[in-house]
Amino acid sequence: MKRRLIIDCDPGADDAVLILMALAVPQTFDVLGITTVAGNAPIEWTNKNALKLVELAKRTDVKVFGGCRRPMLRKPIYAAYAHGETGIDGSSMPEPKTSLQSRHAVDFIIETLLHSSQKVTLSVSGPMTNIALALIKEPGIAEHIEEIIFMGGSTNGGNITPAAEFNFYVDPHAAHVVVSSGLPMKMIGLNVTHQLVTSEHRLEILQRMGNEVGRQVAGMLAHGVEHDRVRFGLEGRSVHDACIAAYMLRPELFTFKKMRVLVDHAGEATMGASITNEYPAHINDQWLSVADSIQADQVFDLIIDLMRTYKD
Ligand code: RIB
Ligand code: CA
């Protein structure tokens, strides 16, 4: 049976790879819709980028719903330092011909879940604002959620601050609402996603694979290589969000640990930090499956294999 999927994202180059991976295998994923949120770039850009990507994938059957343009409480911040002003600098896709759906992402998520005859997986690869608001507005959606698989947090320190990962830092209040919800959840944090990185060779394979998807992905990912190299000492650019799609397609390439996760939504230096440990506690026993290892080479091979399936 196909996995019913809603992709909530802030495209973003690595979100773009996640989207293109999921749209490449319609025999595996019934993508019910893509919902966007402000994060890597303002909502105007993440909306436009999502529309460009479904057109690049020739999958305009998948509709795009614009979501929250700012976090629940905090002022918006963006990641132009990594993704560029547009969110997908380095790409050269034409202006989208299709338009956003009129329904807000939060309403689309609620209505789709409430009316789905089969439980739905939520792929969450940006700040969790849409998901948190959907859970607050209509708690009844919880029983229609198969699981939430998200890229966010970390078990070993942050990226935008020493303590916090970007998605959690942008909207720590939303992250707290979702992470403490008790829903079945898989957290894929920086401790794993920083191992999935580009190399010159991998970018060359994408660039030369003979289709527009490969060329666009190579361009987007190449844009942020220097940032990740200088800032994090990585060999190349991390393709964080691709881990969500890779896990759904090849779960054996990951291991997970059952951990308690708390999100700091009140601190100063630690705002947005994900506090994790493996031991039971007396308060707030929320357990998540937290990604602990990745077979990164095989995951990148999967990315390349899926991008190769696209035909111009
Ligand atoms: O910290 C990395 C995460 O923040 C990724 O999802 C990236 O796309 C940005 O949203
Ligand atoms: Ca993202």
Image (cartoon, helix red, strand yellow):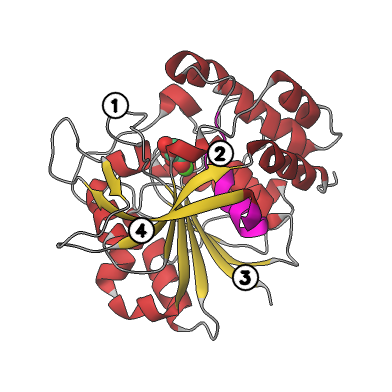
* Upstream in sequence: badge 3 or badge 1: 3
Per the image, the residue denoted by label 1 is 162
Residue at image position (52%, 39%) is 240
* Amino acid type, mark 4: Asn
Q: Which residues are magenta?
A: 238-252
Q: What is the CA distance from the residue labelled 3 to the residue labelled 1?
A: 36 Å
Q: What is the CA distance from the residue labelled 1 to the residue labelled 4?
A: 26 Å
Q: Residue 112 in the image: x percent, y percent?
A: 48, 76
Q: What is the CA distance from the residue labelled 2 to the residue labelled 3?
A: 21 Å
* Upstream in sequence: badge 3 or badge 4: 3
* Amino acid type, mark 1: Pro
- Crowdedness of circle 2 by 10 Å Cα count: few (<14), some, many (20+)? many
Give residue 106's quadrant in the image.
bottom left
* Upstream in sequence: badge 4 or badge 2: 2
Is the shortest distance between ligand 1 and the CB of mark 2 under 8 Å?
Answer: yes
* Amino acid type, mark 3: Arg
Q: Residue 195 in the image: x percent, y percent?
A: 55, 33
Does 241 appear in magenta?
yes
The tally of labels here is 4
Label 2: state its secondary structure: helix
* Disc nearest the viewer among 1 and 2: 1
Is residue 52 visible from the viewing direction of this image?
no
Q: Residue 144 in the image: x percent, y percent?
A: 44, 79
Per the image, the residue denoted by label 4 is 130
Q: What is the CA distance from the residue labelled 4 to the residue labelled 2?
A: 19 Å
Q: What is the CA distance from the residue labelled 1 to the residue labelled 2?
A: 21 Å
Is the shortest distance between ligand 1 and the CB of mark 1 under 8 Å?
Answer: no
Please report contact status of discs 4 and 2: CB closer than 8 Å, yes or no. no
* Amino acid type, mark 2: Asp
* Dot label at residue 3: 3
- Crowdedness of circle 4 by 10 Å Cα count: few (<14), some, many (20+)? many
